[in-house]
Image (cartoon, grey):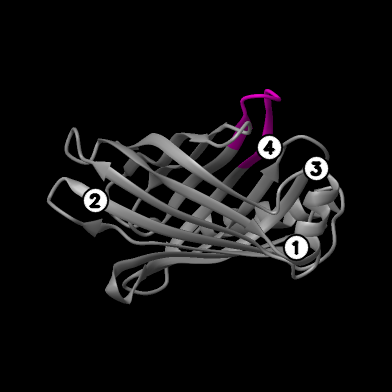
């Protein structure tokens, strides 16, 4: 099944790629939203979240990577890599298709991805994705950059993962979500290229997902103090 998912998900981007290219200039860049250490009582970890892209305004290829690495156990708690294509469908939103491969501790997982990404009213950045695989799930992310001064920015964020089926190996139960809330205060040290920050990150599991975490000796929720930096090139 995993092979079929990967083949199907790979064909859709390939078909989109055949759309005649415009005269738009080639653009590329790296946007690191999070490169940080999270501090907790005995469960510190490193985390990253970045997009690397190349393409045009009409079609972009994006490599998205997110991970959490446990400092004590010296292993990945989560490790996600996605290859996505983004194509505008309105003034402020892109359609997204692609593939995702998770290779943390335990069983690997492969998914096809469809979703939208863009700016909602009041300039909230929104990502809403459906991941189709052995255990499909929906992820919705929202983030807002609030200017305190021209250089100091407060960025609240929320992420909700909702599994659509049971997967005990991954520690998730059907329709029992995981919620992540963040607030990061950054300072634009070199324009927007390097912006170190401090902040807080909170995670909470619900329902059967929380029960499975407790069975593994993990807490239902965690609150971290974070130190890190944003980067934009």
Q: Residue at x 31, y 73 (%)?
A: 91
Q: Nearer the viewer, mark 3 or mark 2?
A: 3
Q: Quadrant of residue 191 in the image? A: top left
Q: Are marks 4 and 2 in contact (CB under 8 Å)?
A: no
* Residue located farthest toward the front when viewing the structure as drawn: 41
Q: CA distance from mark 3 to mark 2?
A: 37 Å
Q: Nearer the viewer, mark 1 or mark 2?
A: 2
Which residue is under mark 4?
77
Which residue is under mark 1?
136
> Tag 2 or tag 4, which sits nearer the N-term?
4
Residue 135 at least partly seen = no
Q: Mark on residue 153?
A: 2
Q: Look at the image and give the residue range highlighted in magenta.
A: 68-80
Q: Mark on residue 217?
A: 3
Camera-side residue: 124 or 233?
A: 124
Q: CA distance from mark 4 to mark 2?
A: 29 Å
> Tag 2 or tag 3, which sits nearer the N-term?
2
Vertically, is 132 above or below 77? below
Q: Residue at x 51, y 43 (%)?
A: 224
Q: Residue at x 68, y 64 (%)?
A: 177
């Amino acid at each position: 099944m995993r092979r079929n998912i990967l083949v199907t998900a790979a064909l859709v981007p390939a078909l989109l790629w055949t759309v005649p290219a415009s005269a738009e200039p080639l653009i590329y860049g790296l946007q690191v939203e999070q490169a940080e250490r999270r501090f907790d009582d005995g469960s510190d970890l490193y985390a990253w979240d970045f997009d690397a892209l190349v393409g045009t305004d009409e079609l972009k290829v994006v490599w998205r990577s997110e991970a959490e690495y446990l400092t004590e156990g010296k292993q990945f708690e989560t490790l996600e890599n996605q290859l996505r294509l983004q194509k505008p469908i309105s003034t402020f939103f892109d359609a997204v298709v692609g593939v995702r491969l998770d290779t943390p501790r335990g069983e690997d997982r492969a998914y096809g991805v469809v979703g939208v990404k863009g700016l909602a009213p009041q300039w909230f950045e929104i990502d809403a994705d459906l991941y189709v695989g052995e255990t499909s799930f929906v992820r919705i992310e929202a983030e807002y950059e609030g200017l305190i001064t021209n250089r100091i920015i407060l960025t609240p964020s929320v992420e909700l993962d909702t599994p659509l089926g049971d997967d005990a190996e991954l520690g998730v139960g059907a329709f029992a979500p995981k919620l992540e809330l963040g607030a990061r205060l950054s300072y634009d040290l070199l324009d927007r290229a390097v912006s170190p920050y401090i902040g807080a990150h909170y995670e909470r599991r619900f329902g059967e997902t929380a029960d499975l975490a407790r069975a593994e000796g993990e807490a239902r929720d965690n609150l971290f103090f974070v130190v890190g930096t944003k980067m934009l090139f």
